[in-house]
Image (cartoon, grey):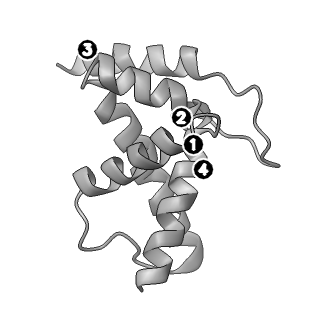
């Protein structure tokens, strides 16, 4: 299982690339993947869920660290990744980091 997850993560990183990003900061890993690719990958294999969920969790953790917040407390990983996938389905040209930003905005509005 660990080898499969590692290989999946590596595949996502290769597929993801970082081109076409309109952000002013470097997006590493799965966050640079277009939403269209995220949705396609998730439809093809549930194993990608771990990769995108791990990236999203790290992104949210860093945000919480920088802002001394606890956003996401009380929400399970399934709810967060489902929200990201919903965003990606509606915004296929955005990259996955924009879905993470959307989640942060939603959590901020609820806090």
**Is 6 left or right of 65, judged from the image as shown?**
left
Residue 7: image location, x then y, percent: 36, 13
Residue annotated with mark 2: 35
Q: Secondary structure at mark 2?
A: helix
The reply to whether callout 4 and callout 1 are in contact (CB within 8 Å) is yes
Residue furthest bottom as drawn? 111
**Which callout, 4 or 1, points at the residue further toward the start of the chain?**
1
**Which callout, 1 or 2, points at the residue further toward the start of the chain?**
2
Residue annotated with mark 1: 91
The reply to whether callout 2 and callout 4 are in contact (CB within 8 Å) is yes
Give the spatial CA distance, label 4 vs label 1.
9 Å
Give the spatial CA distance, label 4 vs label 3.
27 Å
Residue at point 51%, 81% (across, down): 68
The reply to whether callout 1 and callout 2 are in contact (CB within 8 Å) is yes
Decide: is 94 above or below 109: above
- Crowd tier of the residue under label 1, counting other residues whose Cα lies within 10 Å: few below 14, some 14–19, many 20 or above: some
Q: Secondary structure at mark 3?
A: helix
Front tag of 1 and 3: 1
Quadrant occupied by the N terminus: top left
**Which callout, 1 or 3, points at the residue further toward the start of the chain?**
3
């Amino acid at each position: 299982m660990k080898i499969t997850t590692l290989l999946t993560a590596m595949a996502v990183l290769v597929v993801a690339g970082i081109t076409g990003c309109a952000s002013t900061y470097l997006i590493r890993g799965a966050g640079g993947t277009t939403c269209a690719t995220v949705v396609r990958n998730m439809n093809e294999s549930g194993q990608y869920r771990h990769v995108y969920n791990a990236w999203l969790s790290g992104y949210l953790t860093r945000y919480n660290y920088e802002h001394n917040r606890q956003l996401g407390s009380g929400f399970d990983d399934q709810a967060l990744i489902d929200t990201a996938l919903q965003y990606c389905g509606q915004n296929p040209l955005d990259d996955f980091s924009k879905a993470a930003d959307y989640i942060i905005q939603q959590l901020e509005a609820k806090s």
